[in-house]
Image (cartoon, rainbow, N blue to C red):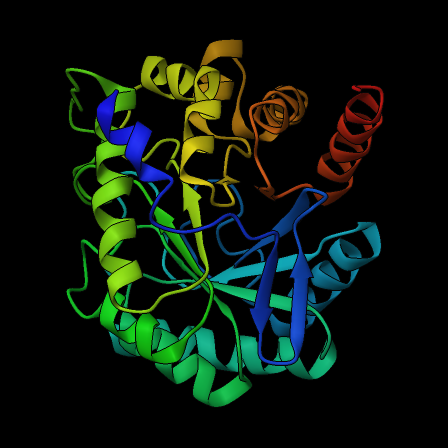
Amino acid sequence: MLITQSAGKFLKRNNTLHLGEKELDLSIPVVAGIVNITPDSFYDGGKMEDESVMLKAVEQMIAEGAGIIDIGAVSTRPGSKPVSTKEELTRLLPAVKALRTAFPEIVISVDTFRSWVAVRVIDEIGPIIINDISGGTLDSKMFETVGKLQMPYILSHIKGTPQNMQDNPEYEDLIKEVSQYFAERVKKLNKLGVKEVILDPGFGFGKTVDHNFELLNRLDSLKVFQLPVMVGLSRKSMIWKALDVTPETALNGTSVANTLALMGGADILRVHDVKEAVEAVKIFCEIKATII
């Protein structure tokens, strides 16, 4: 594919993310623990709305080896209802302030597609990673804002919106179209001075189960961009539908999928279950160490 042959010209591979005085080394894959401050997320909706419960859960994630805590206040599961910016901030700001106070050294990523939310969070707690599931498609000011903020930015692939993305998504050539999407947006970000971009292929965001497995099988196609890759497979429908189980019983399948993602080049695993993901990383690193 011509587009992927030239994509690596945009940004040079960098294994270190910079967040003010903090640095995050990605030379060994990192696990991001998911914290949803939402009543309606597909797996853990409502569990983390109580601050003390959230902080206890985060404490455990850090003890188990999480290098990032990814926190969001809006559910983006298929068919989820829109939430206003005011409501998102009402949920999010107290949570991120409590998180930063309790764990001042942990790297925080904020799951939001709104540039203003990112600005407000950074004003309150300092540098963060901005995790935008929309890839800038839901807020026309996001790329410009990230360029001004100079924060690491997770650029996700999505087709449609959370409300309609699973309404019969179709592709003529999935890998080519995802690559084209990233190439165009990385180029725009580069022109705006965004220096640290992480790619997220967006499993479940405008993709069928078959699309998701094709993407997982071809994850190494993203290496041409010379950018870190984050993968979010944790307990998603591609896993529990394939196994004919439920999200609650999809941990083993998640671990298998995460291991395959690591073998395909994933640098960050975004997960609900940190311990198991960290173990997958350790096994992967043992295998990698034997390769001469």
Is 33 left, or right, of 104 in this rendering?
A: left
Observer-nearest residue: 145 or 251? Answer: 145
Observer-nearest residue: 9 or 230? Answer: 9
The residue at 61%/43% (across/down) is: 272
Task: Say how many tags the image has.
Answer: 0
Where residue 85 appears, x then y in whole percent? 26, 74
The quarter of the picture where the N terminus appears is top left
Where residue 40 appears, x then y in whole percent? 40, 51
Q: Could you tell me if residue 170 is visible in this image?
A: yes
Is 274 left, or right, of 119 in this rendering?
A: right
Q: Where, by quadrant of the figure, is residue 91 drawn?
A: bottom left
Q: Where, by quadrant of the figure, is residue 142 drawn?
A: bottom left
The residue at 75%/26% (across/down) is: 284
The residue at 20%/16% (across/down) is: 173
Q: Indicate whether 260 appears above or below 8.
A: above
Q: Could you tell me if residue 81 is visible in this image?
A: no
Extreme residue in the bottom direction: 123
Q: Indicate whether 106 appears above or below 236.
A: below
Q: Where, by quadrant of the figure, is residue 168 drawn?
A: top left
Where residue 191 appears, x then y in whole percent? 25, 63
The residue at 15%/65% (across/down) is: 140
Observer-nearest residue: 10 or 178? Answer: 10
Q: Indicate whether 176 appears above or below 197.
A: above
Where residue 123 appears, x then y in whole percent? 44, 89
Is 106 left, or right, of 35 in this rendering?
A: right
The quarter of the picture where the C terminus appears is top right
